[in-house]
Image (spheres, rainbow, N blue to C red):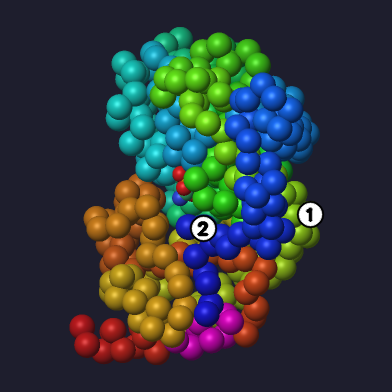
Amino acid sequence: MIYLDNAATTKMYDEALKAYVDVCKNYFANPSALHSFGMEAENLIKDTKKYIGKLISSNESEIFFTKSATESNNIAIKSFEGVALTSKIEHSSVFNAFKHANFDEIRYVNNDKYGFLNEEDLKNKLDDKVTFVSFIYVNNEIGTIQDIKNISKIIKDYNKDIVIHIDATQAMGKIPCDVNELGIDIMSFSAHKFHGPKQLGGLYIRKNAQGKIRPLLDGGYQEIISSGTNNPPAIYACGIALKKQVESNEYEYIKELNHYLRTLIEDNIYDTYIISPLNNSSPYILDVAFANIKSEVLLHMLEEEEIYVSSGSACSKGDYSRILSALGIEKKYMDGAIRFSFSNEITKEDLDCTLKVLKSSIDMIRMVI
Ligand code: PMP
């Protein structure tokens, strides 16, 4: 099997899985219980918050767990009112959360063909009514790394009270997420994108923004912003996975893989458009469009050889990708975008094999149309 769909989800690290099982078996008490057995489980949560807090230069009291980055994004967005700024290239859990949020107006900052936000447009759209902004840090479909530090500076220079939320789901553990360096107030992440368990998300919320957050679910407020019995096995495994991801030292290798596949495709398959920018892009993601190809057909041909990729975005089945539309991709490429996303289990031989199957499949599809 050649698994090139790591932006959709990753395989859990063995260490994370082992930690998960260990906590399920040996620390199964409710972490909210007053007895010492419960406190042991609670301590595992505290240790994890401490680790994450330190990693992103915040305090453990600013880290909260949720059920997913989808929940994290919804909590952040649905807590505010007034006028919001965001973009058209956000993940659906941000884009659609805005549709049901409490804002009087949502303004979409323009982006270029690589997904970089237009700073002049951002400045033009800022005014005294803006209370909240939400931008994606690493784009899940094409990999573009937004210059959050600069964007935050523009916003905070204009009005330091505007709350800045970023969706760091594809960034956490892979590129620096120091919240002070980035100058942001709220940040979402998700454990299953860095080899942790599924259905475990998180939120960093700066101290002075915490009073503004409104929980989506009322209950025991175990995480203050999210109710329901906490999940120590998943939380602890999340911390173990994040530490291993951060210490993996794999970034340069992933970059090598990305450039290797990029070059193989460019050199061997004609009428191809590489959507992911070459610079300021996450090496974990390579989005490529093949003219006059239906990506879904191609995806299934690859699947027959046990090569797993995603067509555009795993989160937007069906219609033209909203994100590709917002990038202004030429029509002949719109149907044919494939997202390859890497892990350090991939080898160059895997990519040679992928190229071979890709090329023969594309030749075949183009022959019959
Ligand atoms: N934001 C981004 C950028 C993502 O890539 C994803 C996962 N596709 C999400 C949010 C949602 O994450 P989760 O699966 O934890 O809800």
Comes first in the chain, label 2 or label 1? 2
Q: Main secondary structure of the magenta part?
A: helix
Quadrant in the picture for the C terminus? bottom left
Q: Residue at x 53, y 86 (%)?
A: 353
**Residue that carries the numbered disc 1 in the rendered image:** 247
Instruction: Please provide the residue range marked out in magenta.
Output: 350-359
Question: Against 102, is 326 above or below?
Answer: below
Instruction: State the mark number for residue 9.
Output: 2
Residue 356 seen anywhere in this rendered image of the structure? yes
Q: Position of residue 355 (x, y in %)?
A: 50, 83
Give, as a three-letter code, the residue at label 2. Answer: Thr
Assess whether residue 355 is covered by the magenta stretch.
Answer: yes
Name the mark on residue 268. none
**Does any portion of residue 147 appear in the rendered image?**
no
Amino acid type at image mark 1: Glu
Q: Nearer the viewer, residue 285 or 221?
A: 221
Camera-side residue: 213 or 347? 213
Mark 2 CB lies closer than 8 A to ligand 1: yes
Gap between marks 2 and 1 measured at Cα: 19 Å
Q: Is 295 displayed left or right of 184 in the figure?
A: left
